[in-house]
Image (cartoon, rainbow, N blue to C red):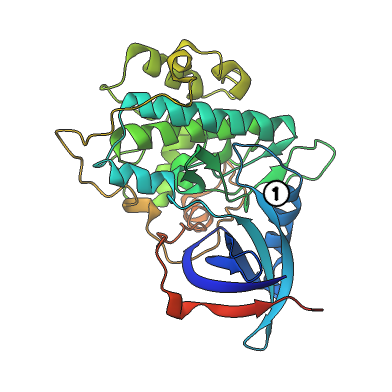
């Protein structure tokens, strides 16, 4: 397939993301690319995404290998979501989203999680930057940290973003479907407050130690309704066996009034805007390696610091592009 690469709009957990256009149909799509020699993680993401088909998951469009600047590049092609990420939407709404719209997005994200979990897959990095928004609402994206849940397989190192990690993940014990629910709860706090789910955090080590061993959970925003607070309490059970599943949460009363996708929502900015940058403290990092090595509760402080420092964040995307920056790309073999 002949296609044209546009401007880089962000970075996923394993590669750069660009907007692209088909030369035959003029269709816009997103393409995630990395050098072929370094594409093991992206090929794994391609395999996972190619097996998923849901209106609540970003649509898979194929893959190819191209030669660009004398380098072989592996390219994963996906649906382009023009409204950007959920984090972008939070900023557009003045720093936080009103509760009806939170319920609307929550329902869609949960439906995506229920589908992914039913296929035996854990996303492992649910957060605002990995939820894309379009005309039909929210869709889960970036499966770069995802894994299949198979007890017969050897356990993989844990991965994801520390701020959204569940206690069992921070302790290096396991990373299964309940971990996605905890991260999802953190994402709801992100929508409601425009700030990170954990406050007064100075470094990654203290953050993960707090998550893993303090017995605490993220503070539930006081501005939410009683039903919304109860919903979040179900997400933040520290014992993963007691955490509600996506299927159970979809039946929670909080979501009943947000079922109709045609509902109009109040989208005006709040009277008081929280201007704290959501990606402050531990989220600021230049490395693009999401992997976090297994953490043992018996590790020394020095070992903990070394292990907990191995993480990164995605670069803020720029969803605009200029026509001059398009370049033609052809697949190998064409």
Q: Quadrant of residue 317?
A: bottom left
Residue 20 percent location from the top left of the image: 56, 67
Image quadrant in which the C terminus is located: bottom right
Question: Crowding near pointer 1: few (<14 within 10 Å), some, many (20+)?
Answer: many
Residue at point 38%, 30% (across, down):
218
Q: Is residue 216 visible?
A: no
Across the whole image, how many numbered discs are drawn on residues? 1
Q: Inspect this view and state whether residue 49 appears.
A: yes
Q: Camera-side residue: 163 or 63?
A: 63
122 shown above or below 217: below
The vertical placement of 158 against 231, above or below, is below
Instruction: Read off the residue under disc 1.
Output: 49
Residue drawn at x 85%, y 38% as measured from the top left: 152
Residue 278 at what x, y percent from top left? Answer: 32, 47
In which image quadrant can residue 173 be found?
Answer: top right
SS at badge 1: helix
- Where's residue 81, x and y in %? 50, 51
- Residue drawn 77% across and 78% down? 332
Residue furthest to the front in view is: 25
Q: Residue 85 in the image: x percent, y percent?
A: 44, 48
Is residue 239 placed above or below 210 in the rendered structure? above
Q: Is residue 203 left or right of residue 297?
A: left
Q: Is residue 203 above or below residue 298?
A: below
Residue at the farthest left position? 271
- From this viewpoint, which residue is outermost toward the right? 152
Q: Quadrant of the N terminus?
A: bottom right
């Amino acid at each position: 397939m002949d296609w044209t690469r546009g401007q880089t709009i962000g970075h996923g957990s394993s590669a750069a993301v660009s907007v692209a256009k088909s030369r035959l149909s003029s269709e816009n799509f997103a393409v995630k690319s990395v050098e072929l020699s370094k594409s093991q993680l992206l090929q794994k993401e391609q395999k996972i995404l190619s097996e998923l088909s849901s209106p609540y998951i970003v649509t898979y469009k194929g893959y190819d290998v191209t030669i660009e600047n004398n380098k072989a590049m592996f390219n994963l092609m996906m649906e382009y979501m023009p409204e950007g990420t959920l984090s972008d939407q939070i900023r557009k709404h003045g720093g936080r989203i009103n509760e009806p719209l939170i319920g609307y997005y929550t329902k869609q994200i949960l439906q995506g999680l229920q589908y992914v979990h039913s296929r035996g897959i854990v996303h492992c990095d649910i957060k605002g930057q990995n939820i894309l928004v379009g005309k039909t609402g929210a869709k889960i994206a970036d499966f770069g940290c995802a894994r299949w849940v198979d007890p017969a397989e050897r356990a993989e190192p844990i991965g994801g973003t520390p701020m959204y990690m569940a206690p069992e993940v921070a302790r290096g014990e396991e990373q299964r479907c309940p971990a996605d629910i905890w991260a999802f709860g953190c994402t709801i706090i992100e929508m409601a407050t425009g700030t990170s789910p954990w406050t007064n955090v100075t470094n990654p080590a203290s953050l993960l130690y707090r998550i893993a061993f303090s017995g605490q959970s993220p503070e539930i925003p006081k501005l939410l309704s009683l039903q919304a607070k109860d919903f979040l309490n179900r997400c933040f059970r520290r014992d993963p066996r007691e955490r509600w599943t996506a299927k159970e949460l979809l039946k929670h009363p909080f979501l009943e009034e947000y079922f109709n996708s045609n509902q109009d929502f109040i989208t005006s900015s709040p009277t008081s805007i929280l201007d704290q940058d959501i990606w402050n403290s531990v989220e600021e990092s230049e490395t693009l390696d999401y992997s976090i090595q297994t953490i043992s509760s018996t590790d020394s402080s020095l070992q903990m610091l070394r292990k907990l420092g191995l993480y990164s964040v995605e670069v803020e995307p720029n969803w605009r592009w200029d026509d001059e920056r398009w370049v033609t790309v052809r697949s190998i073999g064409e």
